[in-house]
Amino acid sequence: MPKSAKRRRDKRKQKKAALASVTPSAQSFKERGTSAFKSGDFARAIRDFTDGLNNIEKIDDELRLALLSNRSAAYSAKYDYENALKDGRKCCELNPRWPKGYVRCGVALIGMSRPFEAKSSFDQALHLDKSLDLKKNTDKCLQIIQELQLNMDEIGGISDKEKKEETEKYKKFVSWMKINGAQINSVYLNVKNKRNRGLHARASMKIDDVLLFVPDKLLLTMDKAKTCKLSKMLLESGYKPQSIQTYMALFLLEQIALGKGSFWYPYINVLPNEFEDHPIFYRKSRLALLFGSIAVDTIYFRIKALRDEYQQLCRHVPAIRKFLFPQFMWARTAVISRVLGVVSDGAKIRAMVPFLDMLNHGKASCKYSYIKKEEKNENSRGFLLKLSQDVKIGDELYTNYGSKGNSRFFINYGFMPRNPCANFQNKGVLIFTMTRDTPFYNEKTKILEKFARRHASGWEHREFEVGIGTDNMDFRRMISFLRYTEAEGKDFSLFRSNFHIEAIGPVSIKNEIAVMKKIASSSRDGLKRYKDTLKMDHNLIKMNRWEDVQQYNCVVMRCSERQVLRWYLHLAETSMNVLQRDWSGVRNPANTLRKEVGTETAMAKYVRSITPLLSNKQLQQ
């Protein structure tokens, strides 16, 4: 064998031996970093991948590429797109034929608001490996490019068919806002259709970045609403409307009548022409789907209240008669679904805020507040919208409408939140009746009438709207009421002295069992009110095939109510099992119940409250 060939062979052996001594360590860094990345600890993943690159002087190109690529992905996950791009480009320099390096560059470039370059990187990756599935990435680039081209005035997403008319309308709206002092920064209005609009990020931004400022001049406040002619006539008439939002509704109707001559026309022109997803506008055939639900009673009550309000307004201010009742319903719905409230200097400010009111409900990525830079300058006071977390380009921005049950989202806003069946703010109605054969009926009714509040029909028949959980005032009021109405014999004698009807604790095992029997009976009666079973509704939701949004809303609404009733039935049955059990041989009932019920469950607090009854031998049955 020639000496030169032998030397080359020896060098290869030495290199192989050297690599064998270092590769396991580098591989372990890679594995640790990958594990951290999967668990969501991106900072630790970056440190592990960096250690794999820095602590080893010589490493094979394949492992170096993998470490650089993985670190680029971790940087992107942390929104550090500059470093992500650097690592992606190092991959491309190290191996120009490796498609994954171009993918990493493309992801980073999207995050840096450079969609054209990102598209080019993805195209290069596909050129090298046509089997790659990059449709989502390229579609994202094309969407952003389209929105940025469509929309140099913060408008995007409008289809070609509607483009001319709709784009012109929204351009005039945005122009009106800017002329009157609004500041719109890196946010655009994405109009998918007439019923689906939202605000999106035009660039990747960090927490506390300012998105939008809407000055006082563009805020439709209660004070401004009371300055219109119709509101002034209403104030002069002496009639007090059922809701102060009526003044805002009258203001909108008056501005609509003025047409293009109104200062507010550009804003009113982009408000929905109809609110078909709001249940007060549903057809009777759709409302029939809510048979047995408390929501249907609330809807009919609201329609009747609005009609009564409209008739009273027409009686006291004849000028309002030129607007039909459906127009009044539209105006009131526009107000209730859009009005925002904040506290500034101890005073609550309620206003309709153009552009900002297009934010949809979800996990809040931004927050708004009312600020005053200069007291006398109208354009330095107004609503400020800032990010509450980092966002990427194209991300939809959300605010949170508050902690509400499905019925309030449904009736006030015309939609159901994501994962609606897991909403612990949902409500159900339990109905209780105290008959004349109830022990101490006369004494109890006298006391109940004494404590009555907002119950003109008396307390013999009570409806309680309650949610899941025992650590809330609704539950405490209900169970306190039942402990009193179900008390008899020695238990009732405890109420001869002063007591508060809404703060009665456990009385006795016998009394508590009677209370739970009442709750179980009311829950079963409530579940029987519905035509379809809960299982049928769950199957419909699982299939996810709906005729329209209205059908979906109705099914989810009744389903969420029945889940509350099922929970109360379970609470009553579990509690009766605990109360009727023989605890004489148990040294510490609290420990036993803690293991059975837990400490953080929705019924845990109630079970803890009745534990002293179980430990008191004098009360054992």
Image (cartoon, rainbow, N blue to C red):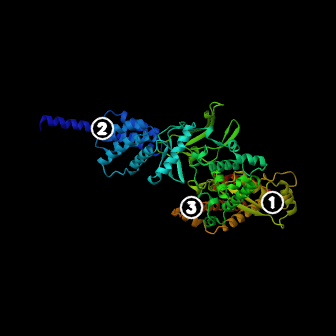
Q: Residue at x 36, y 51 (%)?
A: 133
The three-letter code of the residue at mark 2 reads Leu
How far from the left and from the top, in percent, is residue 184? 53, 39
Q: Residues within 10 Å of mark 3 (few under 14, many from 20)?
A: some
Which of pointers 2 and 1 indicates the residue nearer the eye? 1
Give the image quarter of residue 453.
bottom right
Residue that numbered label 3 is attached to: 552
Q: Which mark is residue 262?
A: none
Instruction: Mark 3 or mark 1: name the one nearer the start of the chain.
Output: 1
Residue 177 vs residue 332: left or right? left
How far from the left and from the top, in percent, is residue 592? 66, 54
Nearest the viewer among 210 and 86 is 210
Q: Residue at x 27, y 38 (%)?
A: 17
Q: Which mark is residue 94?
A: 2
Dot 1: what SS? loop
Residue that numbered label 1 is attached to: 459
Q: In whole angstroms, how far apart are the C-alphas of marks 2 and 1?
A: 81 Å
